[in-house]
Image (cartoon, grey):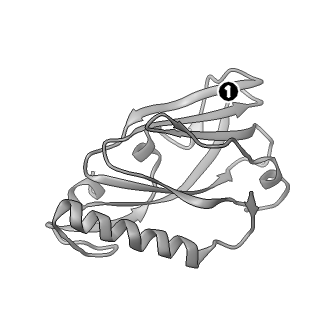
Amino acid sequence: MLFTHRRPVDLLKKVQNEVIKEAVSRFRMSFGGYYPDKNQIGVAELRAKDIGLQAWKMEGLTVNDYNEVSNIKTDKDCYIILEGVSPIDPTITATEIQFVINGNYFPQIDITEAYAYMDAVVWLPQPIVVPPNSSFILRIYALAETVNLKILGTVVAKMGYLMR
């Protein structure tokens, strides 16, 4: 696991550019950056609702067990790039997360070290790209009934999706 306070900008930019190229080809639209026009693709920071959550606060979890906090099919107009995890609360409420995409279980990610530092982030060793119309599951090993944890990432999508 790559643990750093600095975002691995070069790696993330490379993956983002690859996804943008794929999205331009798939959607047959031009790329408009952070402020796309009506018939363009744009980019934005990952929002909780992009991965099926109401907020970055997950409640009613089973303690000392894995909890499936999201199980959705991603939108047809959106690519998601998962980049890292950042605890919102300094109290250790979760120890591991795991992504399951299209039935593929990614390795569990230990996030406990992130709680030891102010504003810490656990960056994934390699960003995970979630294509449109994908099955997406987020599993969290909870130590408390409520976990405040932000999943960091980027969305590459049609402008209409970004405006929802």
Give the residue at mark 1.
66
Q: Which is nearer the eye, 47 or 40? A: 40
Residue 90: give x, y in percent of width and height.
78, 49
Residue 162 in the figure: left or right of residue 61: left
Q: Which of 9 and 59 is in front in this view?
A: 9
Q: Residue at x 44, y 43 (%)?
A: 51
Position of the N terminus by quadrant: bottom right
The x and y percentages for residue 20 are 34, 69
Q: What residue type is labelled 1?
A: Tyr
Relative horizontal placement of residue 105, taking residue 119 as reference (left or right): left
Callout 1: SS = strand
Residue 73 sits in which quadrant?
A: top left
Q: Which of 10 and 37 is in front in this view?
A: 10
Q: Image point 72% across, 47% down: which residue?
A: 89
Q: Residue furthest right?
A: 116
Residue 118 placed where, x, y %? 79, 61
**Is residue 80 depicted above or below 55 in this figure?**
below
